[in-house]
Amino acid sequence: MYAAGIAALLVLAAVLIGRHIQSTSHTLFVSWPPLLARWGPHVGPGTPAAVLVAAGVVAYGPPLAVRLRWRTLLVAAWATSLAWIVSLALIDGWQRGIAGRLTTRYEYLQVIDRFHDIPAALATYTDHILGGSPDHWPAHVAGHPPAAVLTFVLLDRAGLRGGGWAGMWCVVLGAAACVAVLVAVRALAGERLARRAAPFLVLAPAAVWLGTSADAYFAAVAAWAVALLALALTRGSLWAAGGSGLLFGLTCYLSYGLVLMAVIGAAVVLLGFRGLRERPLLVVPFAVGLAVVPALFTVAGFDWWEGYRLLLVRYDQGAGGIRPYGYWIWANLACTVLITGLATAAGLRRTGAAGLGTGWRGPWDRSEARLAVLVAGALLAVLIADLSGMSKAETERIWLPFAVWLLPCCALLPRPRAWLAAQAVLALLLNHLLRTGW
């Protein structure tokens, strides 16, 4: 409770100090700091469904997570997470909540027509990153490697045109991120903790943003890269190792910042090092898979390092160069509290104790200590991203791929229904009181 209280005070400070900074100097470029949102209490067609899903998970989630067969639990977790994300998004209505999110002037669908010749577009991709360049890309296209926009180009080519299909692509895949985390936790820390974490992964406040941005899609790809790595190391699967490498490579070409998923991957390698030592050949398919996506984009003419260098310049050309580092260095963490909930703050306290071997529920638990290592990897990735200064604001969506790996710490909490209720109330308040961005 102390940890949850400190987290709540952090959010309160970020709101009050942020409002003062924005009203006096106007340098935050957000209407309701620390979130990119504006005040606007409302209800919508998704309100009854969201309340019902929340109530159902709180009432039946913990016992069902224990009783269901493992594969059934994974399917149920994905379906319930999808229902939670969609119902929250529909509080804003279909157009604003899902279909219109990726069609704004900052987004990927604005440039679909410029990819009629994909090889030529990739070869000249970096020519349009800087703000002063001819036909410069919108903010999100310029801020990401081309795999992000190319995904929506290929959807369009397949006949799945428009914001509705693009939005649901992100939502459906975003809901699968929780399944990947469950698979990894089971492989590395045991099924008991994975089952206890399941309701918290499903009912995460992050669902407010998993239904509004392409970062939900990025989070799912990154999560499955880590999950397949965990399976490769614990089961000795060469196919899983190759698939993990392939997805890690794709992850780096979806978002520059997601190279930090390597920190979480390192935690997985540490936990599964015995499997790597017994089957060192796992490195081969992983390395081959890892090279595929970078090789394809490099041959097509896109230089990842040049793109990143130009992004740093573009970032300083816009709001990123004006937003005060001194505020966002800690307000970003308040955003993390809002997407992971007070239950995660409390869970991190217990996870820290488990990692240090100072638990209070009896003898030292090896599985809880292993879970602590995995969560610590996610926390370290968040802190590195924070210190970099390349995530000043908007981290409620940018850090979704890291945030889903913090949620398993809630498996160590007692009275799960009370904490789940707190998570649900937070998400419902955020979505009903604020008009969130992206």
Image (cartoon, grey):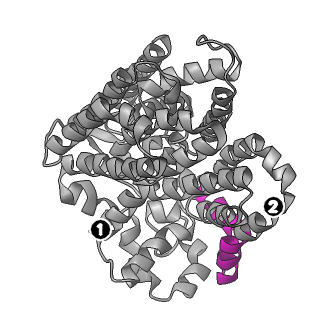
Q: Is residue 155 left or right of residue 228?
A: left
Residue 271: image quadrant is top right
Viewer-nearest of labels 2 and 1?
2
Range shown magenta: 291-312
Residue depicted at 35% across the width and 24% down the height: 417
Along the viewing direction, whichever of 245 and 32 lies nearer the viewer = 245
Q: Magenta: predominant secondary structure element?
A: helix
Residue 28 visible, this angle: no
- Does 413 appear above or below 2? below
Q: Residue drawn 38% across and 83% down?
A: 158
Label 2 neighbour load within 10 Å: few <14, some 14-19, many 20+: some
Does the magenta run of residues contain 309?
Answer: yes
* Residue 365 in picture, x, y percent from top left: 66, 22
Residue 180 position in % (x across, y down): 53, 51
Residue at numbered disc 1: 163
* Mark 1 closeness class: few <14, some 14–19, many ≥20 residues within 10 Å: many
How far apart are labels 2 and 1 at the CA level?
39 Å
**Residue 176: which numbered mark, if any?**
none
Q: Secondary structure at mark 1?
A: helix
In the displayed image of the protein, which residue is found farthest to the bottom?
Answer: 117
Could you tell me residue 103's position as x and y percent? 31, 66
> Where is mark 2, residue-wise?
283
Of the image marks 2 and 1, the number of the one nearer the N terminus: 1
Where residue 382 sits, quadrant-wise, is top right
Identify the residue at horizontal 53%, vertical 46% (top origin): 181
